Amino acid sequence: MIEGMSLADWCTRYPLIETLMALEETSWFNPAIAPTAEALADVGLTATDVDDASARLARFAPYIARVFPETRTAAGLIESPLVAAPRLQQALAERAGGPLPGALWLKLDSHLPIAGSIKARGGIHEVLKHAEDLALSHGLLQAGDDYAQLDGEAERALFGQHRIAVGSTGNLGLSIGIMSARLGFATTVHMSADARQWKKDLLRAHGVEVVEYAADYSVAVAEGRRRAEADPRCHFVDDEHSTSLFLGYAVAAERLKRQLDEAGVMVDAEHPLFVYLPCGVGGGPGGVAFGLKLAFGDAVHCLFAEPTHSPCMLLGVYTGRHDALSVQDFGIDNHTAADGLAVGRPSGFVGRAMQRLIDGYYTVSDEELFRLLALLEQHEGLRLEPSALAGVPGMARVLAERQGYRDRLGLSGTRLARATHLVWATGGSLVPDAEMDGYLARGRRLLQADAL
Ligand SMILES: *Cc1c(COP(=O)(O)O)cnc(C)c1O
C-alpha cells in the first residue's frame, strides 16, 4: 500500500505513473493552469515581498562588492548573462528532424558569481536576511547605513556566535556555506550521498563543517533540521519551506525583464515567453516562476524539468498529493548524475503554491543530459553541469506536444513563430576541469554512438 492505496489502483487512477516507473522520458501539460491574476493568490506572497527581497539585495550590494571582488563590475549585484543560442537551436532542430520556430535563449545562472549556480540567488538572500536581522537587533546596523561596514570585526564577532545550517545535494550548501562563512558565521552543511566530492572539499576549504550522509537529500535535511532545533543560536535554512529562499529566487524576474528589454526581445500575448526550469525540491524554479508570473503575467509559460530517476514534483502535482508521496514509494530510485535535481520528495509549499501557475512538467534521462552537455559545448562553447541541461529539451517538447495544451492556450501560428524559449541554465562554472572533461567525454561518446 502507498498512502492508503494499492499500486494497481494508483496506476489505474493516474496512468502516467507507469511511465514514470518505467523511467521513460515523458511530458505532462497541466490541465489546471489558471489565469495569472487569479492563481497568484495561491502563493500567499506578493509583489511587495519580492520588492523587499530586491531592496535587501540592493542594500547589501556595497558589502558584496567589497568582499567578493568579482562582483565589482556589477556594483555588488549577483546577476548572470542572458545570451541567444542560435547554433544550439539549429543543432536541436536537426535532432528533432524539423524546424523549431521561435528563438532559443539561455539564462546563464551557471555563471552567477560566488556560487556558480542558481543557488546564489535564494541561498545568499536568506543568509543576508539573517545577518541583517541579527545586526539590526544587536544595534550594529541602523537603517540607511552603508552595509560594507558589516565586514568589520564587531560584526564578524557577533555572527561568529551564531550558526547557519542547511541540508543539500551540493549547490545550496555551496552558496550558503561560502556566504555565511564569509560573514563570519559558524556554518554546517549536511550533504546527501549524491553530493560531489569537490563540493565538499571546496566548502571545507572555506572553513565550513560538512556532515556527510550515505542517504539521500530528504535524510540529510531531516537530520540537519533536527540538530539545528536543539541549538537556539542556529538558523536552519529550510529548502522545503523557506519563503526567504523563494523570494531571493523571485528577484531574478525583474532583472531578466530588463535584460530582455535591452536585447530588444518583446514579451506579450503575441510574443509569448516559454521558460524551462530544472527542478529539484522546487524552491529555485518555483521562486523564479513566481517572479516571472508577477513580471509577465499570462505572457510567460513556465515548465519544470526533472530527471527520469527523480520526477518528484511531477508526481506530486500530477496526483495532487505533493509531499505526501516520494518517488521511492513507487520504486523509482532517485539515483541521477544530475546531483542538483536528486530529490525524491518535492517541497509541498512550492507544489501547492504554484500548482495553477506552471504550464507543464517533463522528464529527461541522464544519458540525454550528457548528450546535451556535449552538444552545448560543441555549438555554443558553454560548459554546464548535468542538472543545468534539463531545460534544453523543453522547446522541442512544447513544439511536439499533442495533448491539446497549445490549442487550449492559443499558442499556435504567428505566436509560436514570434515566441522566445528561455532555458534556465542553472549551474556549472565552478565544476573543476577534470570533472568537466569526464562529463564531456561521456556526452561525446553517447553522441558518437547515436551517429553510428
Ligand atoms: C538546486 C538546483 C536546481 C533546482 O533547484 P531546487 O530549488 O532544488 O528545485 C537546478 N539546477 C541546479 C544546478 C541546482 O543546483
Image: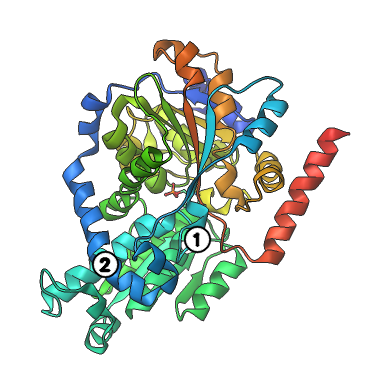
Q: Is residue 25 left or right of residue 220?
A: right
Residue at 34%, 47% in the rendered image:
255
Indicate the amino acid at tag 2: Phe
Point out residue 279 in the picture as x, y percentages from the top left corner: 47, 43
In the rendering, which numbered label is found on residue 116?
A: 1
Point out residue 251 in the picture as x, y percentages from the top left corner: 30, 49
Q: Quadrant of residue 254?
A: top left
Residue at 37%, 29% in the rendered image:
267
* C-alpha gap between disc 2 and disc 1: 19 Å
**Above or below — where is 41 with respect to 128?**
above
How dense is the environment of label 2, judged by Cα within 10 Å: few (below 14), some, or many (20 and up)? many
Give the foreground label among 2 and 1: 2
Point out residue 265 in the picture as x, y percentages from the top left corner: 42, 33
Point out residue 340 in the picture as x, y percentages from the top left corner: 52, 52
Extreme-right residue of the structure: 452
Indicate the amino acid at tag 1: Gly
The figure's colour scheme reads: rainbow
